Amino acid sequence: MGFDGDRAEPCTRCILLAEIDRADEHFRITTRRSSDDLDLSLQRLGLLTAPLVLPGIADTSS
Amino acid sequence: MSGFRRVDACRRLGWEAVPARVLEAPATMYACALKSVGENSLERPLNLIETSRALRLLDRHAPGGTPPPEDASALGLPTHAGLTARLKTLCRMPEEVQAAVLDETLSFAMACEIGQLEEGPAVAFARLFRRLKTGLNKQREIVTLVSEIACRDGIDSTAVLSEPEMIRVQDAEDLDRSQKTQSIRRLVRRRRFPVLTAAEDHFHALRRRLKLGANLQLAPPRDFEGTRYTLTLSFERLEEVERLRAQLDALVRHPDFKALLTGKGRGFAGTTDP
């Protein structure tokens, strides 16, 4: 790793899905698009690994 | 940043909010890139396109434009300079080429080759190979011959692949993929080497007229380049050798055999009429 900023740790908090900009694919790696296979596990087990997000303009300005 | 599919599924299920890991400022863009790649590459094997995207993403945000090899290595990404250079081209290729790589109808090696072509021909080849699902060597043969035809005739490879006969074979409902591949290889070979394929056809017609049978095989000069023919005799018993000797005697006197031996210079043309 280059420097400490590269080791930034995320903090977990509850956010509204509507606030997540799904159109921003700048950091997208995954080629698979379909997510149908996740429905059952989400319904029965919940969200096991929280998505990783960057704060948006509204967040950073506050 | 990471978890697009999870977010989509949660939305579809009608959830309003989810726990999310928020990477707070002042995370650098490079830190975000590292996290984003690691979230995927350390969880599961990346496919070729994902590896390509990961390498590009690190390049884009690395201080100085080049990520330390230790970072790529820690993320489970390839570090060999030649390999990574080729991998990085994949995610810049046309969508259809990337799709062919993803469904494994186009190998990495072949994708790199057709990725160097203009977008039109690259897409046309990818589309063709996704339909044919043929192996690397046959793909390479088709690309080479079609490109040579296009270069010789001053047209685009797409035009060669769109010729009526090519389209007819591709769309033929009575042919399976293997038969289509064989027909297309024959078509492009005929188109690339018209004189040679005509000579081969004439030779085969002449040879059929000799009625050699199963125990006597006559092979043309290799690639029709040399002047020496090969006769192969197949036998198990002495009587068979006797019969073959008689057959050879008859062959030497056969006018078509003489025509065959002397006709190479004119591509065996004019010697096949019954």
Image: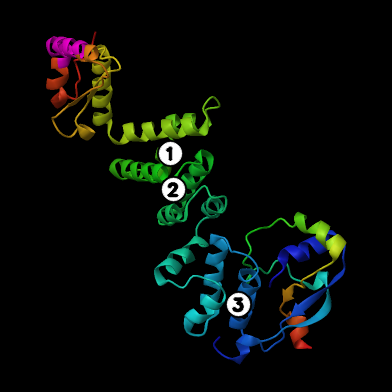
For mark 1, does the 10 Å Cα neighbourhood hold few (<14), some (14 to 19), or many (20 or more) residues?
Answer: many
- Return the x and y of residue B33 as percentages of the image width and height: 60, 77
The quarter of the rendered structure image containing the C terminus of chain B is: top left
Q: Earlier in the sequence, mark 2 or mark 3?
A: 3
Q: Chain of mark 2?
A: B
Which label is found at residue B8?
none
For mark 2, does the 10 Å Cα neighbourhood hold few (<14), some (14 to 19), or many (20 or more) residues?
Answer: many
> Given the current orientation, which residue lies at the most extreme front position?
B238
- Return the x and y of residue B80 as percentages of the image width and height: 43, 71
Q: Main secondary structure of the magenta part?
A: helix
Distance between mark 2 and mark 1 Cα atoms: 9 Å
Amino acid at circle 1? Leu
**Pointer 1 residue:** B161
Q: Element at badge 2? A: helix
The quarter of the rendered structure image containing the N terminus of chain B is: bottom right
Q: Earlier in the sequence, mark 2 or mark 1?
A: 2
The one nearer the camera, B173 or B209, is: B209
Q: Earlier in the sequence, mark 1 or mark 3?
A: 3
Amino acid at circle 2? Pro
**Pointer 3 residue:** B33
Colour approach in the figure: rainbow
Q: Are marks 2 and 1 in contact (CB under 8 Å)?
A: yes
- From the viewer's perspective, is A55 left or right of B234? right
Which label is found at residue B121?
2
Is B249 magenta? The answer is: yes
For mark 3, does the 10 Å Cα neighbourhood hold few (<14), some (14 to 19), or many (20 or more) residues?
Answer: many
Amino acid at circle 3? Ala
Distance between mark 1 and mark 3 Cα atoms: 41 Å
Q: Element at badge 3? A: helix
- Range of magenta residues: B242-257
Q: Chain of mark 1?
A: B
Q: Is residue A29 above or below residue B170?
A: below
